């Protein structure tokens, strides 16, 4: 079973409706760890004033609050798709995909007769 850890890596703010430091973009990463293998994805989330309402002063924000906003913005399907993508990366480490080889064309090989 994979354990997922979220982290907010940057916040971008604007002044909206007189409120300073209104968060409009969050950079985030999610790391999945299955006990042996690890994989991660990084992305950004853009917020509307409705998605981060009611306004919370910047100095009162916590990482947990922002992660909740990100997860709400992604929705259940988006979060599940993100987790599936990370699980897919881990599965590719466990069972590496077969990589086709570029084999010389048989008719282009010089004959040794």
Image: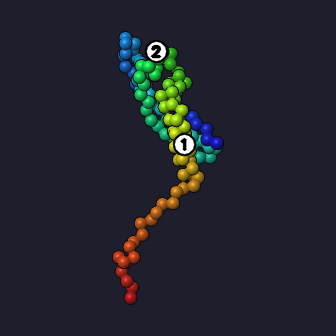
Compared with 13, 76 (above or below) is below
Residue furthest out toward the bottom: 113
Tell me which residue sits at (42%, 19%) in the image: 49
Callout 2: few (<14), some (14-19), or many (20+) C-alpha neighbours within 10 Å?
some
What residue would you read off at disc 2? Answer: 55
Tell me which residue sits at (54%, 42%) in the image: 84
Numbered marks: total: 2
Q: Is residue 8 visible?
A: no
Callout 1: few (<14), some (14-19), or many (20+) C-alpha neighbours within 10 Å?
few
Camera-side residue: 84 or 6?
84
Drawn side of residue 110 relative to residue 57, left or right: left
Camera-side residue: 103 or 77?
77
Q: Are marks 1 and 2 in contact (CB under 8 Å)?
A: no
Residue furthest out toward the front: 77
Tell me which residue sits at (54%, 37%) in the image: 80
What residue would you read off at disc 1? Answer: 84
Residue 50's quadrant in the figure? top left
Percent across and percent down for residue 112 are 39, 85
Percent across and percent down for residue 58 are 46, 17
Q: Which secondary structure, mark 2?
A: loop
Camera-side residue: 7 or 106?
106
**N-term mark: 1 or 2:** 2
Residue furthest out toward the top: 18
Q: Which secondary structure, mark 1?
A: helix
Compared with 30, 46 (above or below) is above
Percent across and percent down for residue 53 are 47, 17
User: In the picture, which quadrant includes the N terminus?
Assistant: top right
Q: Is residue 5 visible?
A: yes
Percent across and percent down for residue 30 are 52, 36
> Real-space Cα distance between discs 1 and 2?
32 Å
Drawn side of residue 67 relative to residue 113, left or right: right
């Amino acid at each position: 079973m994979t354990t997922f850890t979220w982290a907010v890596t940057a916040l971008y703010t604007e002044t909206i409706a007189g409120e300073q430091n209104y968060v409009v973009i969050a950079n985030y990463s999610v790391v999945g760890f299955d006990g042996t293998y690890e994989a991660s994805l990084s992305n950004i989330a853009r917020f509307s004033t409705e998605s981060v309402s009611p306004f919370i002063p910047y100095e009162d924000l916590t990482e947990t609050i922002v992660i909740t906003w990100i997860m709400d913005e992604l929705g259940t399907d988006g979060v599940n798709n993100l987790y599936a993508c990370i699980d897919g990366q881990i599965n590719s480490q466990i069972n590496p995909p077969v990589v086709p080889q570029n084999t010389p064309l048989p008719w282009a090989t010089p004959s040794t007769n």
